[in-house]
Image (cartoon, helix red, strand yellow):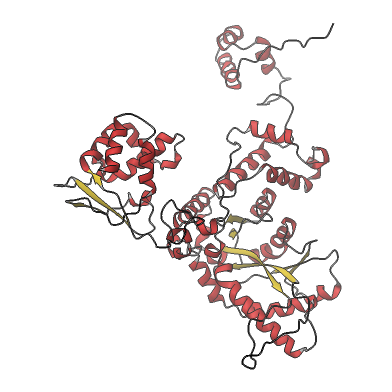
């Protein structure tokens, strides 16, 4: 006869109930009475009160990582998500694996890598986390809007204030930007002087495709820190090592590209000692979301060294990164001149790797500190001001609302204004139907903060009608319609907080383009049948 699995009695009490039961017992109630009241076995309570019990909040065996380590991991995941770089399962597992590689005494996983079972248990222990499908921002360099960037500035400032680092933004020497760039050993020449009408050829004086990766960091006060050269070697030849300036970094990888370990070595041995020497710690380090920068261990190690990583909004380095905006172009131009001068002095020779660092040092010297300072200002990083940015670079701002870059067709005209004709009597009727409780809730929160589609829609409707709400202290006598004018590229959620509502005697359209909010009203009209729907329908058409 096959063995049957013994039925296990289901646990019907919680840790909170156990703690309340113990509290009642300490106050003088008998164990039997307290156990009956809270539905907890007496054996459990007696064990909890014995010397044999060791404090353990959760049931089951101990976790691979300590509780405080998992808490740090959760905080890192949430911060990365808030900064626009959500963590995938693969990145989480690899980040933990990299962390354990540097702490071998803690390694409890087979082959040193957390399993899918560990990941599932980790997610079940931390209910604040969930698996979500992120909104893609690929091709977003063309689709990033002014509102996206302004929201990024607000989010960064909020995070820094929570961590007590907002004052660091006031110190120019402590606001940094870092990025990698490649330099060709035989850069191409655009134009030459020749006889009119004749074709010209140039003889390659070396491997035309060979390039070298260099990590740069600069500060808002105009200082350029020593760079690090990354070479594709197993062992770097002595003549190359001797050619690199003593205060520079020199690293090797299989591909010659930046890796996580190279980036950490640069921070630890080049950047951090320089910042400590100049008393510029703690520092805010703005970088892009390259995989070598975003690992959990990378952020934690940098934080311990007093360098706090802040990731630039995805696909916006041409707008937000000072090195891209102001520094690399003149540096690359200077590199071309330096290489050309070297070729003039060394005809029939080609530039080798051992010649690279001395020539790059000359090119770096040509970048004036004023150029770096202007770059930080143009990117809004120092002073930390979102209004310093040239938002004309946001290509999405030149498209009609709701239309993306891919399907823009041939119509490239820019939005000049948006107008919402609102009949006052219908607006008041809608506000009445929404009710004071919901209005109070919608005032304090953004529409996208609500979980249900209904609340999101009604919150947006209220944001449109907020100027007509009696609680907003805006009186519009003698008028039954209101004109709401929105400046170019201004989002409707920003508009409703401005004191720019004026009365008119008739509905006026400043532009005939439909808006996202108008489409939203159509959506609500088709999703419900109630008095509020009828008012919204009238508002949208009347």
Residue farthest toward the front in the current orientation of the protein: 197
Residue 195 relative to residue 459: left or right: right
Vertical comparison of 206 with 294: above or below: below
Vertical comparison of 5 with 198: above or below: above
Residue 379 relative to residue 118: left or right: left
Q: Position of residue 19 (x, y in %)?
A: 59, 20
- State the quadrant of the N terminus: top right
**Viewer-nearest residue: 522 or 25:** 522
**Viewer-nearest residue: 398 or 289:** 398
Q: Quadrant of residue 462?
A: top left
Residue at 81% over, 44% down: 104
Residue farthest toward the bottom in the current orientation of the protein: 195
Residue 222 shows in this picture: no
**Viewer-nearest residue: 212 or 125:** 212
Q: Position of residue 482 (x, y in %)?
A: 23, 49
Residue 137 relative to residue 234: left or right: left
Vertical comparison of 175 with 106: above or below: below
Q: Position of residue 131 (x, y in %)?
A: 61, 37
Residue at 23% over, 38% down: 426
Residue at 56% over, 52% down: 137
């Amino acid at each position: 006869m096959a063995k049957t699995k013994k039925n296990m009695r289901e646990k019907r009490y919680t840790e909170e109930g156990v703690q309340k039961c113990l509290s009642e017992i300490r106050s003088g109630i008998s164990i039997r009475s307290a156990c009956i009241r809270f539905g907890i076995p007496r054996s459990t309570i007696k064990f909890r009160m014995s010397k044999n019990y060791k404090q353990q909040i959760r049931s089951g065996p101990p976790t691979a990582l300590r509780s405080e380590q998992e808490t740090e991991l959760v905080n890192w995941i949430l911060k990365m998500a808030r900064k626009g770089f959500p963590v995938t399962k693969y990145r989480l597992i690899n980040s933990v694996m990299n962390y354990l590689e540097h702490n071998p005494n803690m390694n409890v996983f087979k082959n040193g890598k957390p399993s899918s079972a560990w990941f599932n248990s980790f997610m079940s222990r931390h209910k604040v986390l969930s698996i979500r499908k992120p909104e893609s921002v690929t091709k977003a360099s063309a689709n990033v809007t002014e509102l996206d960037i302004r929201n990024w500035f607000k989010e960064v400032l909020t995070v820094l204030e929570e961590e007590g680092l907002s004052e660091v933004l006031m110190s120019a020497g402590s606001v940094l930007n870092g990025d990698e760039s490649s330099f060709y050993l035989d850069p191409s020449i655009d134009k030459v002087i020749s006889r009119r009408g004749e074709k010209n050829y140039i003889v390659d004086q070396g491997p035309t495709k060979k390039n070298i990766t260099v990590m740069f960091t600069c500060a808002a006060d105009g200082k350029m820190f020593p760079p690090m050269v990354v070479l594709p070697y197993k062992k770097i030849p002595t003549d190359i090592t001797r050619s690199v300036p003593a205060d520079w970094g020199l690293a090797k990888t299989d591909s010659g590209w930046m890796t996580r370990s190279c980036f950490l070595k640069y921070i630890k041995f080049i950047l951090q000692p320089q910042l400590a020497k100049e008393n510029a710690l703690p520092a805010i380090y703005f970088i892009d979301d390259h995989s070598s920068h975003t690992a959990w261990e990378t952020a934690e190690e940098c934080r311990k060294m007093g360098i706090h990583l802040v990731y630039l909004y995805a696909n916006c380095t041409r707008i937000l990164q000072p090195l891209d905006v102001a520094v690399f172009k003149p540096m690359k131009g200077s590199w071309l001149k330096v290489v050309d001068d070297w070729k003039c002095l060394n005809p029939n020779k080609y530039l080798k790797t051992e010649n690279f660092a001395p020539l790059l040092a000359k090119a770096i010297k040509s970048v004036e500190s004023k150029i770096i300072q202007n770059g930080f200002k143009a990117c809004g990083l120092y002073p930390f001001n979102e209004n310093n940015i040239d938002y004309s670079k946001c290509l999405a701002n030149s498209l009609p609302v709701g239309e993306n870059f891919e399907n823009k067709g041939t119509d490239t005209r820019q939005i000049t204004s948006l107008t919402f004709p609102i009949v006052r009597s219908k607006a008041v009727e809608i506000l009445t139907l929404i009710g004071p409780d919901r209005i109070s809730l919608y005032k304090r929160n953004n529409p996208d903060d609500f979980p249900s589609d209904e609340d999101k829609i009604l919150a947006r409707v209220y944001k449109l009608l907020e100027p007509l709400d009696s609680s907003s202290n805006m009186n519009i006598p003698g008028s039954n319609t209101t004109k709401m004018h929105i400046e170019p590229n201004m989002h409707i959620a920003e508009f409703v907080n401005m004191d720019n509502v004026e009365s008119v005697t008739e509905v006026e359209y400043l532009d005939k383009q439909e808006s996202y909010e108008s489409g939203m009203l159509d959506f609500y009209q088709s999703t419900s049948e109630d008095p509020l729907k009828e008012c919204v329908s009238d508002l949208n058409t009347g």
